[in-house]
Amino acid sequence: MFFSSITADYTKMGYPKAIVRALDFLKNTDLKALPGGRHAIEGDMMYANVDDVETKLFETTKPESHRNYVDIQFMVSGEENMGFFV
């Protein structure tokens, strides 16, 4: 898991090209103007899900994992605590 800022120069961090393209989308798109739902970036291979959610209490959540894809979480507004297990 990586924590960073969209204002960081992510092009020099050694990320795979697909991650850089996804971060470019996040940096260069007016995300507040997008309606909720799924938005294709590169067809079904890369897309953005726009959600407007309330943060849940830690005690009511379950861990999340991915085996077949990478998940980039980008918070447009608000705040949230995130963590990870090793």
Image (spheres, rainbow, N blue to C red):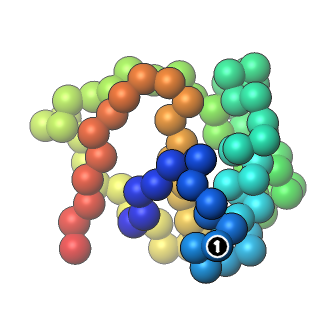
Q: Residue at x 71, y 44 (%)?
A: 27
Q: Residue furthest right?
A: 43
Q: Residue at x 70, y 29 (%)?
A: 31
What crowding class fits label 1: few (fewer than 14 Cα within 10 Å), some (14-19), or many (20 or more)?
Answer: few
**How far across and down, in percent of the image, does residue 58 sit?**
18, 37
> In which quadrant will I find the C terminus?
bottom left
Q: Nearer the viewer, residue 58 or 5?
A: 5
Q: Is residue 54 above or below residue 65?
A: above
Left or right of 28: which side holds 57? left
**How far across and down, in percent of the image, does residue 83 sit?**
26, 53
Q: Nearer the viewer, residue 22 or 67?
A: 22
Q: Residue at x 59, y 47 (%)?
A: 7
> In the rendered image, which quarter is residue 46 located in?
bottom right
> In the rendered image, which quarter is residue 29 located in?
top right
Q: Is residue 62 above or below residue 52?
A: below
Q: Residue at x 27, y 39 (%)?
A: 81
Q: Residue furthest left?
A: 59
Q: Amino acid at mark 1?
A: Lys
Q: Is residue 58 above or below residue 21?
A: above
The residue that mark 1 highlights is 12
Q: Nearer the viewer, residue 56 or 29?
A: 29
Q: Is residue 5 above or below residue 86?
A: above
- Tag count: 1
> In which quadrant will I find the N terminus?
bottom left
**How far across and down, in percent of the image, does residue 36 sit?**
67, 24
**How far across and down, in percent of the image, does residue 66 sit?**
46, 66
Left or right of 53: which side holds 85? left
Q: Nearer the viewer, residue 50 or 12?
A: 12
Secondary structure, mark 1, is helix
Left or right of 55: which side holds 72? right
